Amino acid sequence: MGWKAAQKLIHHWKILRGDNVMIIRGKDRGETGTIKRVIRSQNRVIVEGKNLVKKHIKQGQGHEGGIFTVEAPLHVSNVQIVDPVTNQPCKVGIRYQEDGSKVRVSRGIGASGSIIPRPELLKIRATPRPTIAGPKDTPMELVLEKTFDAKTGKG
C-alpha cells in the first residue's frame, strides 16, 4: 500500500527540512520534533521520532524480515512551526528586510512576530563541492581570458 499523489500540490513551501515543528493533529498531538524529510509530491513531512507505526517486512535476499517500527509521513497541514520566542505553534509569513533579503517570520494569534531562522541542516551539502580541478573542468587561464572588447563590440 503506497501513498497516492496529492491532488493539489503546495507550490510555496514555508516548512523546511530541519525546522522545529509541533504536531497539531493525530496520535502524537502536542509533541514537538524536527522535520527529517519533506515529501513534496504528497504534501507530507516526516518528523523525527514521531508518528511511529509497525511495518511488516518480508524476508528477502540480502535483508532480514520481521516487524519494524518506522516513522510514517504526516500531512503538512497537521504540523506547525514552533515560534522561537514563545515556543507555541504559529503560522509562517514572509518579510523582506532593508537589505532585500527574504526572511520567515512568525505570525498568528499569540505569535511574537520574530524571525524564524533557516535550519543549519540546509547549509550542509549532502555531497561536498570538489576542491581540485578534474579532467572535464575548464582551466583558470581560459576562464580569465578576455574574449570580448566592449569599446569596439568585437569578440
Image (cartoon, grey):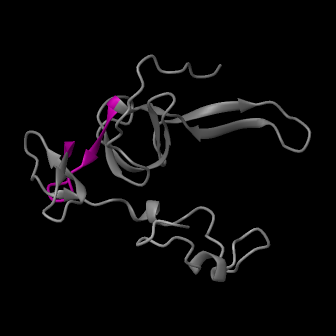
90 relative to 105, above or below:
above
Q: Which residues are magenta?
A: 77-93
Verify whether residue 130 appears in magenta. Answer: no
List x then y, in percent, for residue 20. 34, 52
73 relative to 133, above or below:
above
Would residue 5 appear left or right of 22 to someone viewing this image?
right
Question: Where is the N terminus found, in terms of image quarters?
Answer: top right
Q: Residue visible at 42% across and 25% down?
A: 9
Q: Residue visible at 61% across and 40% down?
A: 69
List x then y, in percent, for residue 90. 19, 43
The residue lying furthest to the front in this view is 152
List x then y, in percent, for residue 140. 64, 81
Depth order, front residue of 42/2: 42
Question: Where is the C terminus found, in terms of image quarters?
Answer: bottom right
Q: Using the rendered view, name the quadrant where residue 120 is placed.
A: bottom left
Q: Using the rendered view, name the quadrant where residue 23 is placed.
A: top left
Verify whether residue 89 appears in magenta. Answer: yes
Would residue 130 appear left or right of 75 to someone viewing this image?
right
List x then y, in percent, for residue 106. 17, 49
Depth order, front residue of 74/7: 7
Would residue 92 appear left or right of 64 to someone viewing this image?
left
